[in-house]
Image (tube, rainbow, N blue to C red):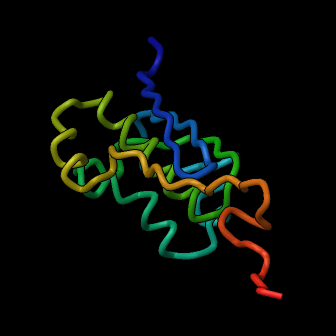
Amino acid sequence: MAKMQYYGTGRRKSSVARVRLIPGKGNVTVNKKPLDDYFGMEILKREVVRPFEIAGAEGKFDVIATVKGGGFTGQAGALRHGISRALIKSDLEMRAALKKAGFLTRDSRMKERKKYGLKKARKASQFSKR
């Protein structure tokens, strides 16, 4: 019999995370590397595994994730979003706790586009009267 797998897609800024949850011991693999090797900062590692703590599912699932785009913080946020979505598919009762923590809301803050006539999104050349 095949193992149950739960999928979730998480996004933040320009980062996209494809997450697969498999029943296991709590190992997290990101882009074929262990979590400790992929994310250097302790804050980012803690942010990634936080949905498990809130849902009370520590050590129940192994995470296999592919993350593309953006920087480390955006990738960690996208991973957290994807894990939260996959956890809901595994058990619908976790939704209330994850929703209250704000892990199911997609962070919509994006880089603003550059406008013509300006140097960047809002930066204009210095004004001179003469």
| Residue pictured at 48% horizontal, 74% vertical | 43
* Residue 52 picture location, percent across and down: 32, 52
Relative to 36, is 85 above or below?
A: above
Q: Nearer the viewer, residue 98 or 29?
A: 98
| Residue pictured at 77% horizontal, 86% vertical | 129
Q: Residue furthest top?
A: 1
Left or right: 90 as drawn, with respect to 17: left
Q: Residue furthest right?
A: 130
Q: How many marks?
A: 0
* Quarter of the image where the N terminus is located: top left
| Residue pictured at 19% horizontal, 52% vertical | 100
* Residue 10 picture location, percent across and down: 49, 41
Relative to 45, is 17 above or below?
A: above
* Quarter of the image where the C terminus is located: bottom right
Residue 119 sits in quarter: bottom right
Left or right: 21 as drawn, with respect to 126: left
Q: Nearer the viewer, residue 73 or 56?
A: 73
Left or right: 117 as drawn, with respect to 82: right
* Residue 8 picture location, percent across and down: 46, 33
* Residue 82 picture location, percent across and down: 46, 41
| Residue pictured at 52% horizontal, 50% vertical | 12
Residue 74 sits in quarter: bottom right
